[in-house]
Image: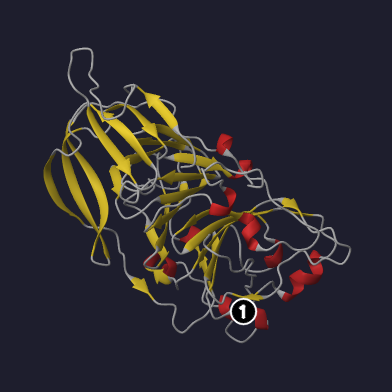
Amino acid sequence: MPYYRSVGCVPPKRHTQHRDSDGNLYREELMGEEGFSSDSSLLYHQGVPSAIVDSQVWDLPDQTRTPNHPLKPRHLKLHTLFPAPGEGPGACPVEGRRQVLGNNDVRIGYVVTGTNASPLYRNAIGDECVYVESGSGTVETLFGVIPYRAQDYVLVPRSTTHRWVPAEPSRLYAIEANSHISPPKRYLSRFGQLLEHAPYCERDLHGPGETFVVAGSDVEVLVKHRVGGEVVGTRMTYDTHPFDVVGWDGCMYPYTFNLEDYMPITGKIHQPPPVHQVFEGWNFVVCNFLPRKVDYHPLSIPVPYYHSNVDSDEIMFYVGGDYEARKGSGIGLGSISVHPGGYAHGPQPSAIEASLGAETFDETAVMIDTFQPLDLGEGGLAAEDPSYAWSWAGRRAGASATGEDGGPAVFSNS
């Protein structure tokens, strides 16, 4: 996180005695990144945060990955993976996630929840960035409670114990990193402040405002971790409730950021994808394409030019409006387009002329560019429209013209 917060009751000096009104010593826990060399927070527990009484295997949902071979673009219809919100009980926000795409740097999952809370959960592999396509609720964490709403990114740091509590059925698009996720370095000063040219600022990041203390014993927490290169799960049972934190301070904590607070950057001619970037992780970036004024050169072409992802796979998740470069195609709300490295992509041919003279675009999409090839998860294979790859060539026997563009390009991880 780029700035400091203090919540609840903390002592004047770190690593000194901190006691309750009865004289009992609180237990201090440092949660820190990169081996004491990066952001951290100090938490003060009523109990012992290391005290577990049991540890068992947690069998994860299907983690199978299938290479994109032979190489081709893909169209994945995520809304076909679950009943619509409210049509049935809904899935668990954590255990019900279906893996759509993944590699050794990042995994993309999708779930449509009911209103039942998830189990307590901790991802010990990396940070999570969960985009809320629709719905609302809260995320309870050992740092406190953060509310979520539609179009929020919910950022949960690695190894943060939390649970999802939907107030209404929610569509959640989960980006699970093997690293930390943060604002792009070019948006930050050398001391970590968001700079004037950044499309958002600290006022737009909403972390916990007060502690959330819960009593309990023999409390089960689902932990996602790695054995070698494999993603596995463990059920740990804690002697006392992990939500026993009476105060904390530091620069690492969960927070939300809403798309309404992102200020799109526009220009006289078509702007490249880095202007839409919102976060970065190791070997991947996250961008968002939002309603905005578009190019104002008299001869501008507002939709993207054809481009080759020579270093990356490009994943576009369409969540609002009508994406201009795909009008009239099979891409719709809830669709993902997969444009892999080694493949040149761009707008549907008819979309180029149709975009000329446009002053605004009404579209919302979340993009992930990865710098290693993505495999298909079981959810991705189940949601695929197999005719999509041939759509730029027009209608052919056995293939429908369900086309689309690719948007953006290639950018550096710094």
- Depth order, front residue of 18/156: 18
**What residue do we see at 55% from left, 65% from top?**
412
Q: Residue at x 57, y 34 (%)?
A: 203
**Residue 372, how many percent across, how many down?**
45, 71
* Residue 278 visible somewhere in the drawing: no
**Is 261 located above or below residue 401 in the figure?**
above
For this orientation, the residue located farthest to the right is 298
Query: Coloured how?
Result: secondary structure
Q: Secondary structure at mark 1?
A: strand
Residue 379 in sight in this render: yes
* Residue in front for this viewpoint, 168 or 194: 194
Vertical order, 287 against 194 (above or below): below
Residue 362 image point, x, y percent: 71, 53
Dot 1 corresponds to which residue? 344
Residue closer to the observer: 106 or 267: 267
Q: Residue furthest top?
A: 21
Towards the viewer: 285 or 16 = 16
With respect to residue 367, does 65 lie above or below? below
Residue 303 spot, x, y in % from top left: 73, 66
> In the figure, is residue 109 to the left or right of 367?
left
Residue at x-position 82% and y-position 55%: 359
Mark 1: give few (<14), some (14-19) or many (20+) Cα within 10 Å.
some
Question: Looking at numbered disc 1 in the image, what kind of residue is underneath it?
Answer: Ala
